[in-house]
Image (cartoon, rainbow, N blue to C red):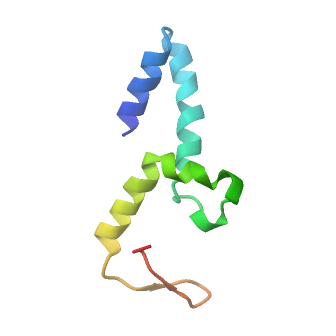
Amino acid sequence: MGNSIGLWTGSLFKDAQKSTAMAPALLMPLMMFSGLYNKLDSIPKFISWMQYISPFRYGLHAVLLTEYEDEKYYTLSGELYDYKQ
């Protein structure tokens, strides 16, 4: 996934330095809206649409379902956390 985004940014610019500078500007928002760093419910509604265009969100969700599908975890507040959302 990272390679394909790198190839895409490389095809946008003729200069490799511009492409290298642009890659973090594209990757960081996609990673922030994947659910890796914060819960997706905590994202404000006016910008929550970004989570649906992030390929990292779908990759993270697939890994969590594969690894923790049959496990039960409780949050610090005592609520049952379900990965099948």
Q: Is residue 61 left or right of residue 19?
A: left
Of the 4 image quadrants, the one containing the N terminus is top left
Residue at image coords 42%, 17% = 11
Q: Nearer the viewer, residue 44 or 24?
A: 44
Q: Residue 21 at what x, y percent from top left? A: 57, 23
Q: Residue 40 at what x, y percent from top left? A: 58, 63
Q: Residue 26 at what x, y percent from top left? A: 55, 34
Residue at image coords 41%, 58% = 60
Q: Is residue 82 left or right of residue 39?
A: left
Of the 4 image quadrants, the one containing the C terminus is bottom left
The correct choice, above or below, for 82 with respect to 37 in the image is below
Q: Does residue 39 appear in the picture of this structure?
A: no
Q: Is residue 11 left or right of residue 28?
A: left
Q: Quadrant of residue 83?
A: bottom left
Residue placed furthest toward the top: 14
Q: Does residue 2 appear in the picture of this structure?
A: yes
Q: For the image shown, how many numbered marks are present on the structure?
A: 0
Residue at image coords 53%, 45% = 30
Residue at image coords 40%, 37% = 2
The correct choice, above or below, for 21 with respect to 52 in the image is above
